């Protein structure tokens, strides 16, 4: 195949760029419209695609994990929709819940709800004179660092973000803000004053909707200064009104194994 | 917390291979017979037809032939082993679903698999970058770093000798391009940058970038002609 074919008409020069995805939207649309009626350009596209595909061999060759083969065969066989396969569970689906010491799911909810209530009451309490100074001092360390990030986030995040502030009734306690952009399923955590979990343990975030079972949203650990910065992903159609944090065995648990030490309600900004 | 992506990715992917390849182009033609690539194409086309009638064994055969190449490509783009696995799974799922409507006139199965994997990988890369931007706003300091590809760097099984041979040919062919040509092609292929994004990254005019990509690919295609089964260009 000689070069003169590729310069026979101007669109032919765009074939390689189009296959690479390097054209801008307008150029790409025009080229695609042209392709529909031009066999020569379709041939050029095919030839470019064959050449480009071989570039995959230029990547460092790494053997895939053995389990991937089984996963590929399993997923193809069950004909999952792309929407399903895009929500990668952040906690290993095979994680088995250790024996829970809570007597019942209701007990767990009660603990979470009382935290939420206590947090709301605690906030009210802090506003009252007298109580404020004592509590403020204790909260200063954990609040201030989180507040910096709070103002940053509040200023720039989109209007469709709901936020939640999780607190504990402890005097010196971690503070955590959750930012959930429903349209993308992205959940951003910004927190401070977290103790590092013990070896083999991790923190886990749970979402609760309408009294249903707590759904794991993912796990996170603080950095060396106790700050938490994490991005989790939840399904776009997820619904939850309350979030809570427990400490679990790494890499996370299918169900919470202890009462939450942080909880908060999600609401519009 | 997942390792975060760095914006400052060096497209040096090709350089070490171009420099270290022990093959010269003069010896390439003795390695590749046009007929061997044609046999591969026919074999793969039959597998797609089998898949269209629900033969999962055909899917397994295609995975065994192209899984490592696809995974390596995905890993080079998304730089996270779990994400790379997701890309591979989505690619083969898409192949399975689209088997009945696969049009052999539009190209080989191998090229379809590779370019589909590249598209899925770039989609995921963009998603992760969006997440990173959101996180960056939430933090005054962000850990960045070139996340080295994880996952086993073990030697590839000997029954993938054909893929290894193709890899050597590709790397040797890349040596026939100039550094500038390899650079722009790597940026466009592995990072999915548009012309203007490439131009901004390397600080060159847009026209220069377009020409370099085009002539670089022409040269690459000429060098790979034996592998592509087209004979002399």
Image (tube, rainbow, N blue to C red):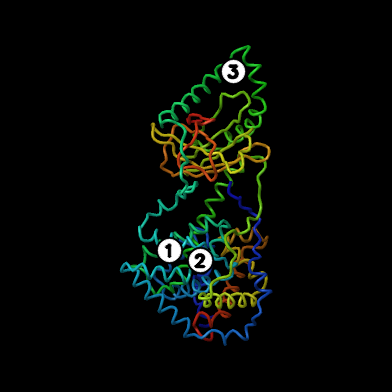
Query: Is there any visible trace of residue B194 in the rendered image?
Result: no
Q: Nearer the viewer, residue B40 or A31?
A: B40
Q: Nearer the viewer, residue A14 or B56?
A: B56
**Residue A168: x, y in percent?**
56, 26
Residue at the (63%, 58%) spot, across then down: B148
What residue is shown with label 1?
B92
Query: Is there any visible trace of residue B173 in the rendered image?
Result: yes
Proximity of marks 2 and 1: CB atoms separated by less than 8 Å: yes
Share a chain, discs 1 and 3?
no
Q: In the rendered structure, the residue with mark 1 lies on which chain? A: B
What residue is shown with label 3?
A126
> In the current view of this chain or complex, which residue is farthest to the left?
B53
Share a chain, discs 3 and 2?
no
Badge 2 density bin: few <14, some 14–19, many ≥20, Cα 10 Å? many
Q: Nearer the viewer, residue A30 or A238?
A: A238
Q: In the rendered structure, the residue with mark 2 lies on which chain? A: B
For residue A150, what is the image quadrant? Answer: top right
What residue is shown with label 2?
B70
Badge 2 element: helix
Residue at the (57%, 74%) spot, across then down: B167
Proximity of marks 1 and 3: CB atoms separated by less than 8 Å: no
């Amino acid at each position: 195949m000689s070069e003169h074919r590729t310069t026979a008409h101007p669109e032919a020069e765009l074939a390689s760029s189009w296959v690479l995805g390097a054209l801008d939207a307008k150029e790409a649309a025009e080229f695609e419209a042209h392709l529909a009626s031009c066999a020569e350009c379709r041939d050029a596209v095919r030839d470019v695609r064959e050449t480009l595909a071989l570039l995959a061999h230029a990547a460092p060759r790494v053997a895939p994990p053995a389990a991937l083969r089984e996963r590929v065969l399993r997923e193809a066989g069950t004909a999952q929709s792309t929407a399903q396969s895009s929500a990668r569970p952040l906690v290993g689906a095979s994680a088995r819940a250790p024996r829970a010491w809570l007597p019942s799911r209701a007990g767990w909810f009660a603990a979470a709800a009382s935290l939420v209530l206590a947090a709301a009451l605690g906030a009210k309490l802090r506003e009252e004179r007298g109580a404020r100074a004592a509590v403020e001092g204790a909260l200063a360390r954990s609040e201030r660092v989180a507040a910096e990030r709070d103002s940053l986030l509040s200023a720039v995040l989109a209007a469709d973000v709901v936020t939640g502030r999780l607190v504990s009734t402890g005097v010196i306690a971690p503070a955590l803000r959750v930012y959930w952009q429903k349209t993308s399923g992205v959940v951003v955590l910004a927190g401070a004053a977290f103790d590092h979990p013990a070896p083999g343990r991790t923190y886990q975030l749970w979402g609760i909707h309408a009294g249903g079972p707590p759904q794991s949203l993912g796990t996170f650990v603080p950095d060396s200064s106790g700050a938490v910065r994490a991005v989790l992903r939840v399904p776009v159609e997820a619904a939850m009104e309350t979030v809570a944090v427990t400490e679990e065995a790494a890499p996370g648990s299918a169900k919470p194994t202890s009462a939450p030490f942080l909880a908060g309600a999600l609401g519009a900004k | 917390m997942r390792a975060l992506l760095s914006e400052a990715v060096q497209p040096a992917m090709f350089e070490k291979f171009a420099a270290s390849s022990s093959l010269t182009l003069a010896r390439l033609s003795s390695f590749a017979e046009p007929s061997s690539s044609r046999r591969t194409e026919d074999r793969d086309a039959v597998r797609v037809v089998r898949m269209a009638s629900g033969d999962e064994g055909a899917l397994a055969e295609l995975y065994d032939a192209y899984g490592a190449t696809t995974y390596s490509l995905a890993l080079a783009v998304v730089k996270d082993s779990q994400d790379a696995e997701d890309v591979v799974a989505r690619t083969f799922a898409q192949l399975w679903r689209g088997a009945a409507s696969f049009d052999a006139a539009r190209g080989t199965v191998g090229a379809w698999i590779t370019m589909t994997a590249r598209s899925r990988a770039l989609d995921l890369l963009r998603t992760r970058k969006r997440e990173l931007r959101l996180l960056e706003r939430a933090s005054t300091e962000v850990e960045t770093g070139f996340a080295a590809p994880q996952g086993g760097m073990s030697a590839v099984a000997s029954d993938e000798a054909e893929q290894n041979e193709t890899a050597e040919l590709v790397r040797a062919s890349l040596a026939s391009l100039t550094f500038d040509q390899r650079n722009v092609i790597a940026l466009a292929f592995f990072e999915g940058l548009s012309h203007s994004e490439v131009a901004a990254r390397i600080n060159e005019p847009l026209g220069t970038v377009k020409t370099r990509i085009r002539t670089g690919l022409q040269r690459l295609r000429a060098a790979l002609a034996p592998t592509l089964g087209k004979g002399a260009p």
